[in-house]
Amino acid sequence: MSKMLRRGEFWRVGRFERVELGEGKHRGRDEAGRAWADGFVSAPAQQQRAQPAQFTLFSAAMLSWLTIAVVLGSDISVGQVLALLAALIILFAVTVGLLSKWASQMRVSQVRAERTRVAQNRVTQQRAALNGETANRGFRRRWLLLLRLRGVVTFLLFVLGVAALLVSQLFVQEQQRNQAVSQISERVKNFPVELVEYPKQKMRAGGDTTNWVTAKTVNDPAGVRVLLWLSGPQPAEWAPGTRLLVTGSVKQLPRASASAFSISVRELSEAVGGGSAHRPPGLLHPVNTAAATLRSRLTVASGSTPGAQLVPGFATGDTSLITADQQQQLLNTSLTHLVAVSGANCALVIVAVTKIFAMMGANRAVRNTAALAALAGFVLLIGPDSSVLRAALMAGVCLVARFGTVGINGTAILGFATTLLLWFDPWQAIKPGFMLSVSATAAILLFTDPIRKRLLRMRVPEIVAMPLSVTVAAQLGCTPFLLLLSDGITVLGLIANLLAAPIAPFATGFALLAMLTLAVVEPLVQLVLVPAAACSNLVLLIANWLSDAAVATKIPWPQGLLGAVTLCAVVLLPLVFGRIRKITQKPSPGLKPRLRTAVESVLIAAAAVLVSINVVVKPNLGAGAAPTDWAVVGCDIGQGDAILIRNTADPGTVMLVDTGDDPGLLQECLDDFGVRRIALLVLSHDDRDHVGALSQVREITERALIAPRTLGQEERTVVTQLESAGIPYSTGGRAEAGNSGSVGRISWEMLGPGLPFYSSETNEASLIMRVETGELSVLLLGDSSEEGHNRLLREFAPETFAVDVLKVAHHGSKDASPELTALSHAKYAIVSAGAGNSYGHPAPRSLESYRSSGIVPLRTDLYGHVVVRADENLSNWVEKPPD
């Protein structure tokens, strides 16, 4: 460092002085000045450490990622962010220039002053340097402070420059998306697209599946992303590069979506023949097709092997065989990452190939080349998933570095991979897979070693300390981002990961070996699938064993950005304390101990206030006071219906009956009661006050049940919205063979209307259902009439209507059967009506029938949200208790 400074800075000063003062006459003074400079710089410079370039690249990538994520997740204009970044870059560039100029002027003036002093005192050069070292200590401190400040500003300038570069790329791609969307109509016919990923399938509650695939436009030079919602499983040979002609309805997707628009596919075919849409596929298309066929064969073989549902997930990330309950159990125990292909899979492939070639006696170059080839083949097999690409890029850089003597720095490689991925696809920044992959990798790189050393000092064996430190570090990195997806902190997730960690490598290894066996000697695949199934079964057993306990022991924590920031503050607090103590650990009189105490006190107080406001105070103010042990909720959404039903032992599986017509009020109710996913959406009939807010819940709905079509009804808005969102749906009603079903622990039976349905009245088409949660029962009457109730009384036995909770018909209208109300023997009647509505709901006649039957009416127009708990007494809670 001192040599660089002497050659790069002080030598230029000396050369300037020689020109100014004359080469021969003042040579002694020039040498004395350089000698002083050597003494001035060498000792302090050796103690300083320049900001590592690796950490600079890592910081630039992280800032760019967070900036893009904030822009895409909000209404902030990309142009505004670019303008702000440009202003900061200009400001910092000017600051660097000024600091450099001041530092140079300080050096020149000090060298001149020292030479003058040497000439006047007539001392030797060495003595002059020593005197200068002592006499100018204050100047040296100021000068070094200036250099450090310039280094910090230069670091920030580089980081902001990278962020501005990536945000500008986002700006360009967003303009291309908007242009593509503006040129497409609401319906397309034979629209050409090219697949960019393998088709995906997810099993929903009740056994239904959702199928989709991501493609890109062919006629558009930019190749804008398109999401295709498919009606069912597609041919096994479909792979990235396959070109299709699509017919269906188009829906523009939100800005935060990775695709510009979606197409609910009605008809499709592979593109053959001539024309711009039928260009020859790329060179890799045959390889991708073979990989797709191999993936499909592994899924089929695993489906026919008992207990092998997770095997395709361990090998290729394919979770199509996992049931909805198993998905929820893995989510509850924080084990979903095991079936998301990432760095562990890439490492396993590289290690296996390297070991095989090492046993064959290959040198390092051959081993690295073989590992690179195997890694490339593995990426082609998995597809362009964000976590796989991130891991493959990092592994590829490490392998290339091993060809020479270049040092490898994990944070630099992570920064490089993140920057490259965001350049090609900025929307990666808000994909959950990308967020969790990058955050976990960064935390492992930064925190694993300190945690491991601390565990070793606590006398924890190395064999336990290493996996425990990796698991804890990854959990610390992921948890703040998990709060962006769901509320609460899963404590038992750490234990589940520690139990599953030793099993995962064997499960992944056997799964990959099974795929290799399928490609080479298919008859022997069962020999490999059996141990793979055993390993995957162990993981499922761990998830099943800890799932309920994980939900019960979940630490309440607010969801969203504020909750994530609060958790980061709590996690980073010990690190800040450690740094403060390291700085002030040497005993010194006066300020330092008091300063340390003051800073620590302020940090503790700030963290306590932050946690108290967000974790304690805020959840217990207003809407946050809603009970968490609810079983049935009547949402206060004005003049309309929105009923939430669940089993409290399975809180993640929620049935929503109708949506009302106010998206804002519906979302408030969902937030108040912690609903993040709707397993089944029941739309009792097509009136606006029951389906008007459907758009608010399309993104979180897994499956829908709708009323039958009325006479003369051709276009149904409900059907169009469900199809455009790719939500599978079925038509309810009572057929001759009956109509019943279940989702999680909730089961239902259809009592009406009868099918086939012949009426033009939407109210008469209302679904009438009896719902059982295992804890209580609910009778849902929709907007049915007294005539329909009398028909039910003739067709069903009286005990059919005996329930715990009655959702009254038509908001408490007088057009209802008092006899049916009495036969329900319900403890509560939920009356969903708007305050001061002009319809006179609920009617006095209906209120009297509830009272005469001993039923307590829970009215949303008077009490706001109303709740029935599934405790021994079926207690209730209301948002606005009566005076």
Image (cartoon, helix red, strand yellow):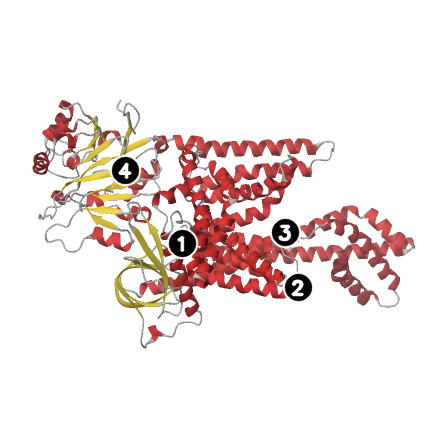
Tag 2 residue: 404
CA–CA distance between discs 3 and 2? 32 Å
Q: Earlier in the sequence, mark 3 or mark 1?
A: 3
SS at badge 4? strand
Circle nearer the N terminus (2, 4) = 2
In this rendering, the answer to whether 831 lies above or below 90 is: above
Label pair 2/4, CB-CB below 8 angstroms: no
Q: Say the numbered circle drawn on residue 56.
A: none
Q: Give the quadrant of residue 350.
A: bottom right
- Residue 285 visible in image: yes
Disc nearest the viewer among 2 and 1: 1
Quadrant location of the N terminus in the rendered image: bottom right
Label 1 crowd bin: few (<14), some (14–19), many (20+), radius 10 Å: many
Q: Secondary structure at mark 2?
A: loop
Q: Which residue is mark 1?
A: 318
Location of residue 237 by image quarter: bottom left
- Residue 753 at x, y = what percent? 13, 43
Which numbered mark, 3 or 1, is in the foreground of this view? 1
Q: Which residue is mark 4?
A: 746
Say few, some or many: other residues with alpha carbon within 10 Å of mark 4 (under 14 / 14 to 19 / 20 or more).
many
Looking at the picture, which amino acid does disc 1 mark? Asp
Residue 525: image x %, image y %?
43, 57
Secondary structure beneath label 3 = helix
Query: Pointer 3: what residue?
Result: 152
64 or 372: nearer the viewer: 372
Residue 756 in the image: above or below residue 16: above
Q: Amino acid at mark 3?
A: Val
Front tag of 4 and 3: 4
Q: x%, y% of residue 837?
A: 18, 36
- Mark 3 vs mark 2, foreground winner is 2
How many numbered circles does the render carry? 4
